């Protein structure tokens, strides 16, 4: 998984040569799982979209098909996560509620608590902002469902967030991913993408610490 994160460009190029159009389905599954399953927050998101956009620029993938499929995967993932959260998130949001079952063993309560704080701080727009924050984006839809956010409201933010996330990340890869300095230093670019992605969370934590003094 770490190799896929840091060398997504090489891995996707290999998969494209081995599997052809099946790669679209692989990318759909990864993005769906990363956004839709609270047990897989470790899957790559931003870097994978960037690498997929860069691969599309070489002609190995069609950018229009890629964008439609991955936006659909992101929307469906969050919708499933929201539905699961409506039924199960209370186990993690309340310290008094006993945690039972396989989900309770696999999901860390602190991840849910962090996402809940992010959701409370930003309100509905947290569904959009969380798209750009690793780990948090996996848990905010889960928390939104548990907090009984109206589904129609959630659906609007979900669609807007998915379109922005895929368009910006894959579009950046398409435009810049094959520039020699970027291609030759892909690991550093990935680390930079992750750093920029977690910046909103770092800012919120700093504000919280400052206000608590």
Image: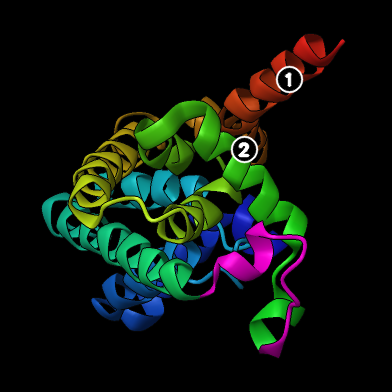
The residue that label 2 is drawn on is 117
Q: Earlier along the polypeptide chain: callout 1 or callout 2?
A: 2
Q: Which of 31 and 113 is in front in this view?
A: 113
Residue 20 - label: none
Magenta highlight on residue 99: yes
Q: Which residue is drawn at 72% across and 85% down?
A: 100
Magenta highlight on residue 184: no
Mark 1: secondary structure: helix
Residue 98 screen position, x and y as percent: 76, 77
Compared with 208, 197 (above or below) is below
Q: In which quarter of the image is the N terminus?
A: bottom right
Q: Which image quadrant is residue 179 in? A: top left
Q: Is residue 45 visible?
A: yes
Q: Residue 6 vs residue 15: left or right?
A: right
Q: Do the residues labelled 1 and 2 touch (CB within 8 Å)?
A: yes
Compared with 200, 190 (above or below) is below
Residue 87 screen position, x and y as percent: 46, 75
The residue that label 1 is drawn on is 208
Q: Residue at x 30, y 64 (%)?
A: 79
Q: What coloring was used for the rendering?
A: rainbow
Q: Outermost residue, left direction?
A: 64
Q: Which residue is drawn at 12% across and 52% down?
A: 64
Compared with 129, 153 (above or below) is below
Residue 93 screen position, x and y as percent: 64, 58
Q: Outermost residue, bottom direction?
A: 101
Tag 1: Cα neighbours inside 10 Å, few (<14), some, or many (≥20)? few
Numbered range of the magenta stretch: 88-101
């Amino acid at each position: 998984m770490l190799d896929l994160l840091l060398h997504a460009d090489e891995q996707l190029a290999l998969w494209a040569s081995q599997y052809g159009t099946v790669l679209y389905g692989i990318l759909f599954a990864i993005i769906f799982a990363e956004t839709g399953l609270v047990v897989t927050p470790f899957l790559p998101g931003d870097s994978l979209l960037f690498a997929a956009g860069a691969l599309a620029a070489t002609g190995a993938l069609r950018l229009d098909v890629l964008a439609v499929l991955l936006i659909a995967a992101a929307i469906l993932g969050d919708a499933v996560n929201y539905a699961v959260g409506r039924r199960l998130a209370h186990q993690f949001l309340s310290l008094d509620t006993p945690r039972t079952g396989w989900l309770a063993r696999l999901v860390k309560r602190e991840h849910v608590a962090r996402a809940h704080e992010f959701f409370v701080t930003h309100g509905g727009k947290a569904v959009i902002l969380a798209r750009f924050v690793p780990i948090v984006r996996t848990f905010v839809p889960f928390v939104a469902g548990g907090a009984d956010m109206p589904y129609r409201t959630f659906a609007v933010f979900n669609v807007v967030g998915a379109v922005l996330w895929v368009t910006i990340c894959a579009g950046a890869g398409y435009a810049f991913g094959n520039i020699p300095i970027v291609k030759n230093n892909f690991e550093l670019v990935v680390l930079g993408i992750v750093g920029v992605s977690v910046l909103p969370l770092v800012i919120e934590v700093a504000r919280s610490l400052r206000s608590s003094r």
